[in-house]
Image: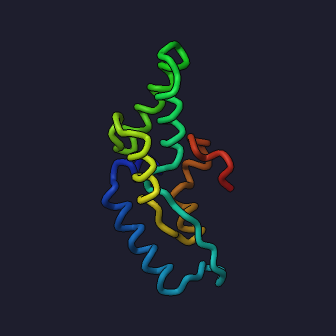
Amino acid sequence: MAHFWAEHPRELAQLLERVQARVNANGRSSDGTNHPEVHHAAPRCLISLHERANGISLDGEGIQAWLEWEWEAMRWRVPVEISRDELEVLVERSTVVLEREKHRLIHEGDWRRGEPGAAGRP
């Protein structure tokens, strides 16, 4: 599912706008309780991947770290040469509050596959 959203950022933005409007309208989930969660359209795991790729020498481990960063950056359409500060701003500006159920639907495939950043997610 994350690959779909990475390839269709405009559709993701439209979905997030509709969900945000619905949350703002009633602030309640389907069970009648309020369960907001923060979604990052640009995932936070990019920051740690960027730090790791830029923080070690280009030996075997360093090359692997760089390739992981490059792959995820391209997947999420983030410039590979972005600075850490710019990346942090990008990730923080990509946040939106979603109902718990909607947020989990967006990340359903991530949690199942255990993608980077999925650790610790419920």
Where residue 92 appears, as percent x and y from the top left, is 46, 57
Residue depicted at x 40% and y 31%:
70
Displayed quadrant of residue 78: top left
Say if 58 sits above or below 11 in the image.
above
Q: Dividing the image into 4 quarters, which one contains the C terminus?
A: bottom right
Say if 43 sits above or below 20 in the image.
above
Q: Farthest top residue?
A: 59
Nearer the observer, 58 or 12: 58
Where residue 59 appears, as percent x and y from the top left, is 51, 13
Residue depicted at x 34% and y 61%:
11
| Left or right, residue 63 beside residue 121 | left
Where residue 47 appears, as percent x and y from the top left, is 50, 42
Say if 39 sits above or below 85 in the image.
below
| Left or right, residue 113 beside residue 66 | right
Residue depicted at x 58% and y 45%:
117
Displayed quadrant of residue 30: bottom right
Nearer the observer, 43 or 84: 84
Where residue 81 appears, as percent x and y from the top left, is 34, 34
